[in-house]
Amino acid sequence: MKLVGPINHYRADLSGWIGSVVMFIFALFATYRWHTTGLIFFALLVVRDLAASWFLLSRNPSASVQSSVRPWRLTDLLAYISSALPLLYLPAESASSFAALASTLLAIAGFTISTLALLDLGTSFGVAPANRGIVRSGLYRYLRHPMYAGYVIAEVGFVLLNPVNAVILAASFFFYILRAKLENRIFD
């Protein structure tokens, strides 16, 4: 497992830099949400977004990059929208202590799975689908898309806190399935 590569200061493909900045901005917004809600979900989202920002700087370039600057595509936009959706979850006005505990445990479990998947991907990580090599170790030995599975587990806890969040979860789930299908198409 290769966790980091050299930061690509001289990269011809700027998508890693752009993605890193976008994920850093998401981390700042997640920090704000964490401080205003006190929910551990948003603290874990800060860690996710900062880790993604770092890995986007040190990742392997896409094998599909043909020119010095690849134009952003609709799939890139959808991937970043999908990454931003968890920032929109609404906290509960009042929740039972059981719902709050269950939500916290689901967030910890889901983000643990997602973080392990990110570490398994290492420098092959990217937000938008691209061919950076297939990873078959760690959690990827057992699941094709463990990162998305972890995100869904973490996000289900927000529906326990506030049923209105089911709409955001449904949108997130739709985007995770779409991203998985696009990734599968690249490797199949």
Image (cartoon, rainbow, N blue to C red):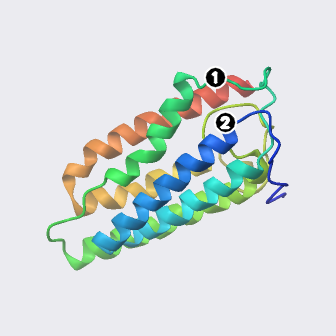
Q: Picture coordinates of residue 38 (x, y %)? A: 32, 75
Say whether disc 1 or disc 2 marks the residue closer to the N-terminus: 2
Q: Is 65 displayed left or right of 185 in the figure?
A: right
Q: Quadrant of the N terminus?
A: bottom right
Type of amino acid at the residue the image marks with label 2: Ser
The residues bearing labels 1 and 2 have C-alpha atoms spaced at a distance of 8 Å
Q: Is 33 displayed left or right of 84 in the figure?
A: left
Say which mark, if any, is on residue 71: 1
User: Which of the 4 quarters of the picture holds residue 114?
Assistant: bottom right
Type of amino acid at the residue the image marks with label 1: Pro
Instruction: Determine whether the residue tagged by mark 2 lies in a helix, strand or loop.
Output: helix
Q: Picture coordinates of residue 46 (x, y %)? A: 50, 64
Q: Picture coordinates of residue 53 (x, y %)? A: 62, 54
Residue 169 appears in the picture as rendered:
yes
**Residue ID at (67%, 36%):** 15
Residue placed under numbered mark 2 in the picture: 15
For disc 2, the neighbor class at 10 Å (few under 14, some 14 to 19, many from 20) is many
For disc 1, the neighbor class at 10 Å (few under 14, some 14 to 19, many from 20) is few
